[in-house]
Structure formats: structure tokens, C-alpha cells
Image (cartoon, grey):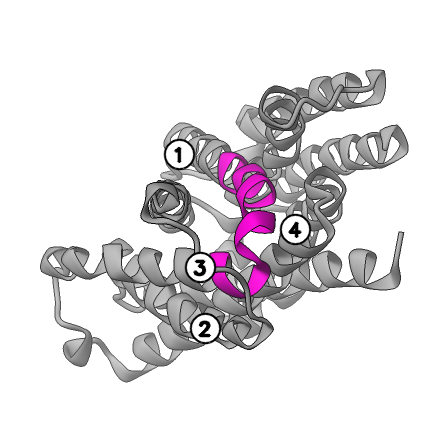
Amino acid sequence: MTAALIVAPLFAALIYVAAVLMLKRAAELGAGLWHSTVVCNLLGGLIFQVLLLLGGKSLPWELWWQPVLVALLSLTGQTLTFFALQRGDVSIATPILGLKIILVAAFTTILLSQSLTWQIWLAAGLSTCGIATLHHAGARRPGAKTTATILSAAAAATAFALFDVLVQKFAPQWGIGRFLPLTMGLVGLFSLPLIALFPTPLRELPRPALRALVGGGALFALQSLLLLSCIAYFGQVTTLNVLYSSRGVWSVVAVALLGRWLGSSETTLPASVLRWRFAGAALMLAAIALVLIGR
């Protein structure tokens, strides 16, 4: 396993946590779900064009359904992720999004004909226990829509798991410098009609909200660039997602240590709530370790 294969997804996980905390802050300052979805996807579509420098192939029109399908999965996952993050707590939604690693393993078996080890099945059980812990009454705060957060985050994880596995499946025949720029460009293009759903035009958002939105969107695009480039280049989608899923633990730690400085409302949570969330995150971290051993 090369150093890049380890460092890039871990770094992407840290950037992800910073991105979602900024987007959460933007939401608290007035940015809506559709603001976050459109801004992040447009910035992602632009940033991914740097990969055009790597080159690739021009494939027949009969195969263009592949980037279109993958782009739609990305847009679906993105929208559900922001719904979960804005309607619930970051330290609940992000560990649930970590379920993606188990789903990636399952879809890898189905779509890429790769078998699962016993460690991965045990990891699935630990992840389920982690979700149950995060959903425990002691992990909730008054007024939080915990069930909606978990369901939407789990649905987002499913869409993103399919997205990642299909990137590994389709990217080689196109080339990393063609498939990813095309796919993420389509995600940005497909997001444009969502501007009609803006409750408030971007120019009318408070300046602090707009700064947090653009900053969070840029970081979100950067972490996607790191992870997806590695998937397309190395092809080890399960291993990469194991390392990337550390974001579930980093999110709980970041809220506890940096939330007040970042202006997060989750800093007011009682210590008992955070203890339950740390327990849930620890279970999911154990699941990650098992999957890594199973590789």
C-alpha cells in the first residue's frame, strides 16, 4: 500500500469535517439546503476540470450513460447529505455517513465480483451497533430530528457507495483525466435547475453566511477531488473508503474541541450526549479497523 493511498483519504477525511462544519455554520446563518447543494456542486464541477491535464480517451456516445448515471448518484447523495447536516447534528450525521464503507464492500461484491471476508461482515454488525448507540435516547438533544438525520444520512451513504464503486468500474476505460472532469461537470450542470428552489437569492444572504458557504463548498470539492482521484487511479475503493470513513470520528472530536471557535450550536450539548456519540463513533472506528484487517 503506497503512502499516497493512505495519506490522501485520511487528509480528505479531515478536510471533509472542516467543510461540513463550515456548511453547518452557513446554514445557521441563513444559507438553505439548495444553496449548499448548488454552490458545492458548481465549485466541484470547476475544480475537477484540473484533471483534464491528465488526459484520457474519447469514447462513443453509447457509453455516455455511464458519467450521466454516476453524476445523478452524486447529486442525490449530495442533496441527502446536506439535508442530514442541516436538519440534524454534524456529530450524528457524519458517523452515519460512515456506513458507506460497508455498502461499498457489498456493492464491490455485487458489481465488481470481489468477495467479502468475515471481518467485513463483523464490521457491518459493529456499524449497526454504532448506529443504535447514536440513536440512543442519551445521544439526542431536545428538538433534534435524529430519526430524519439518520435515515437521510444512510440514504446518502447508499448513493455515494454506488457512486464510488461505479467510478472504479467505469473510470479506467475513459481515463482519470476524462471520466472525473466530465462526471463532476455534469453534476454542476444538473444542479443549475435547483437555483429555482432558492428561498433567497445568493446575493441577499448575509455576508458571513456567504463566506462560510463558499469556503465550505471549496473544501468539500477539494476532499472529493482527493478521494475520487485515488479511487480512479488506484482502484482500491474499499480500502480507500475504510480510511476515509475516519471522518465519523474526526467530526465528533472536532465538534467537542473546535465547535465553539467555529460557532457551532452543538457546543451546548450536555456531556452525557457527547459521551454517547463518542461511544457510537468508537464502534464505527472499530468496524473500520476490522475492514482494514480484512483487506
Q: Which residue is mark 1?
A: 152
Q: Which marked residue is nearer to the observer: mark 1 or mark 3?
A: 3
- Labels 4 and 1 touching (C-beta < 8 A): no
Q: Amino acid at mark 2?
A: Gln
* Crowding at mark 3 (Cα within 10 Å: few <14, some 14-19, many 20+): few
Identify residue for label 3: 58
Q: Nearer the viewer, residue 63 or 111?
A: 63
Q: On the image, numbered disc 4 is attached to which residue?
A: 231
31 in magenta: no
- Range covered by the magenta-colored residues: 161-179
Residue at position x 12%, y 55% from top?
197
Instruction: Answer left or right for 91 relative to 87.
Output: right
Sequence-first tag of 2 and 3: 2
Q: Amino acid at mark 4?
A: Ile
Q: Amino acid at mark 1?
A: Ser
Name the residue carrying label 2: 49
Query: Within 10 Å of the Cα at label 2, are there few (<14), some (14-19), or many (20+) other Cα atoms?
Result: some
- Secondary structure category for the residue under label 4: helix
Foreground of the two, 7 or 50: 50
Q: What distance separates the C-alpha of mark 2 from that of mark 4?
A: 17 Å
Mark 4 or 1 closer to N-term?
1
**Residue drawn at (32%, 57%), measured in percent from left and top?**
186
